[in-house]
Image (tube, rainbow, N blue to C red):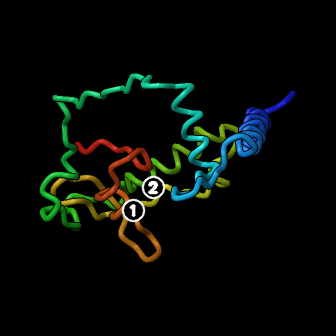
Amino acid sequence: MASSHDHEKCIMWCCYNSYIIEGNFRPHKPTGKRLRTFYDFLDEVYISLIGEFRSVSIIRQRSVTKVIEPRLQNVGSHHPERSADATGNQTCAVCREKANRFAAANPGTVAKDNPFKKAKTVFRCSSCLTFLCIREGSNCWMDFQYSTGDEIVIVCL
């Protein structure tokens, strides 16, 4: 079965052959005028086929009730702090989310084979009160505080 790419190549070859044949009846470089290139020919073919028709553009409405997550508000007020009531038993929200996503994507994998470990921490964000690990080789703090897309989705309490 022919792919759409093959169809596009076939149409392009047909257009090129038409351009060459047209050159036998109408010169591509009339005296005193600029050269009419193959791309100029294609533009004329497209306009003659499509005309003034334009596809309906989709206008997306912005959400009026968009809620900005607390971790993205007042960015300068989010600082790591060592919680006084932390027992060292709290897990990093980012590490936990990464581990859970890996486990959901790979249901047959045992916990010890999960490359994302649920790290224990005593540090949290002073504004969000979300526990995050701060250690060498970890970028959980930056991932949590500055990601806005689906790469890490964690709700601040």
Instruction: Identify the residue under disc 1.
Output: 140
Say few, some or many: other residues with alpha carbon within 10 Å of mark 1 (under 14 / 14 to 19 / 20 or more): some
Q: Residue at x 77, y 36 (%)?
A: 14
Q: Between residue 135 and residue 66, name the one nearer to us.
A: 66
In this rendering, is residue 84 above or below 51? below
19 displayed left or right of 39: right
In this rendering, is residue 98 above or below 87? above
Amino acid under label 1? Cys
89 displayed left or right of 18: left
SS at badge 1: helix
Residue 18 location, x and y as percent?
74, 37
Q: Quadrant of the N terminus?
A: top right
First-in-chain label (1 vs 2): 2
Q: Residue at x 45, y 55 (%)?
A: 95
Q: Quadrant of residue 157?
A: top left
Q: Residue at x 54, y 28 (%)?
A: 48
Q: Which label was assigned to residue 63?
A: none
17 displayed left or right of 56: right
Q: Between residue 155 and residue 39, name the one nearer to us.
A: 39
Q: Quadrant of residue 24?
A: top right
Q: CA distance from mark 1 to mark 2?
A: 7 Å
Instruction: Identify the residue under disc 2.
Output: 95
Q: Quadrant of residue 109?
A: top right
In this rendering, is residue 52 above or below 143? above
Residue 51 location, x and y as percent?
48, 25
Are discs 1 and 2 less than 8 Å apart at CB? yes
